[in-house]
């Protein structure tokens, strides 16, 4: 049974230390339970159980992360509703992001070992794997389930943290024109699209919802913000409470008109 391409001994050790059970490690690594155990033993890592044992080790993660609202939690939650998936059978959640800096920030905020499924011939972006029944249940309480793509509701986010949540959504599924006049977010859930549209209307942004069919015949919705004044106002609202937790290129494009609009506003009030 060959090891999957790109999987190193260090990655196997990180998965083991994170608390990932053997049955979830096997498809990621491509080795049998016994072969994984041998890698762990070869590096003199303290072994808490044999691979045939049914006992589970304590998973290292902040299992209260999605219980308490904060700007970091809201941003990660926004990322997750766009780029995350919930396992249907196992107690695990996955974050997919081509920018590994973002995945490392998520791991840092959630206090979890950085265990990723690397890019392969069938996977174009790395995936951060987090194992926790508690976190999976907390996400379900927030409306996120294993079949979320079509039924995802717009979550009940406290107003104080809405900007950070929307920043996470933009970082996950947002497209920003390089000239900074247009931004849209794509979703397969009409309920989520409508909720996001209502937030943008509440913020007095120029917004609309459009829809189209994908090549597979599935309907998707796009929520738009248009015009440099609305784009600039959006950027003020979503980047107000962040230090490093944002995608650099999107922030650069969304904020490029801010100085111009601020000068215009100063001239008008004077």
Image: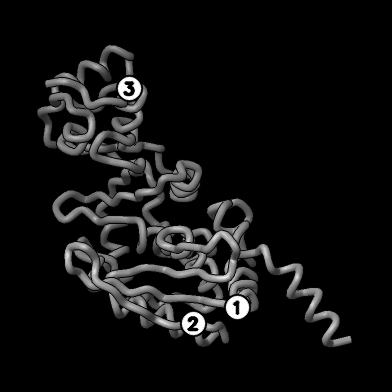
Give percent across and percent down for residue 236. 65, 71
User: Whole-Å distance between the Cαs marked 1 and 3?
Assistant: 47 Å
- Residue lying furthest top in this view? 42
Q: Pick the residue in front: 137 or 180.
A: 180
Quadrant (top left, top right, bottom left, bottom right) of the N terminus = top left
Q: Quadrant of residue 120?
A: top left
Q: Which residue is mark 1?
A: 230
| Mark closest to the chain's N terminus, 1 or 3 | 3
| Mark closest to the chain's N terminus, 2 or 1 | 2
- Mark 2, secondary structure of its residue: strand
User: Whole-Å distance between the Cαs marked 2 and 1?
Assistant: 9 Å
- Labels 3, 2: front one: 2
Q: Is residue 179 above or below residue 199?
A: above
- Mark 3, secondary structure of its residue: loop
Quadrant (top left, top right, bottom left, bottom right) of the C terminus = bottom right
Q: Pick the residue in front: 47 or 256.
A: 256
Question: Which residue corresponds to the image point at 71% horizontal and 69% vertical from the top-left?
Answer: 258
Q: Which residue is mark 2?
A: 207
Q: Quadrant of residue 24?
A: top left
Q: Are marks 2 and 1 in contact (CB under 8 Å)?
A: yes
Q: Which residue is mark 3?
A: 8
Q: Pick the residue in front: 243 or 112.
A: 243
Color style of the picture? one colour
Q: Residues within 10 Å of mark 1 (few under 14, many from 20)?
A: many
User: Whole-Å distance between the Cαs marked 3 and 2?
Assistant: 47 Å
Q: Residues within 10 Å of mark 3 (few under 14, many from 20)?
A: few
């Amino acid at each position: 049974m060959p090891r999957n391409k790109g999987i190193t001994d260090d990655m196997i050790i990180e998965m083991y230390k994170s608390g990932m059970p053997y049955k979830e490690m096997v498809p990621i690594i491509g080795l049998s339970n016994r072969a994984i155990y041998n890698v762990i033993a070869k590096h003199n890592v303290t072994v808490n159980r044999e691979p045939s044992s049914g006992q589970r080790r304590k998973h290292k993660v902040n299992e209260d992360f999605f219980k308490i609202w904060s700007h970091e939690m809201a941003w990660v939650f926004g990322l997750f509703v766009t780029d995350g998936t919930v396992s249907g059978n196992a107690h695990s959640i996955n974050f997919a992001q081509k920018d590994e800096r973002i995945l490392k920030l998520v791991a840092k905020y959630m206090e979890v070992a950085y265990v990723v499924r690397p890019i392969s011939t069938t996977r174009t972006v790395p995936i951060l794997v987090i194992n926790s029944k508690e976190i999976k249940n907390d996400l379900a309480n927030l409306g996120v389930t294993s079949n979320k793509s079509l039924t995802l509701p717009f979550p009940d986010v406290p107003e104080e943290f809405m900007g950070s949540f929307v920043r996470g959504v933009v970082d996950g599924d947002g497209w920003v024109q390089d000239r900074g006049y247009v931004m849209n977010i794509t979703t397969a859930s009409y309920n989520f699209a409508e909720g996001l549209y209502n937030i943008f209307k509440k913020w007095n942004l120029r917004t609309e919802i459009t829809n189209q069919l994908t090549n597979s015949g599935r309907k998707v919705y796009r929520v738009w913000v248009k015009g440099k004044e609305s784009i600039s106002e959006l950027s003020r609202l979503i980047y107000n409470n962040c230090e490093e937790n944002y995608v650099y290129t999107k922030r650069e494009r969304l904020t490029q008109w801010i100085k111009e609009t601020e000068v215009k506003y100063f001239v008008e009030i004077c």
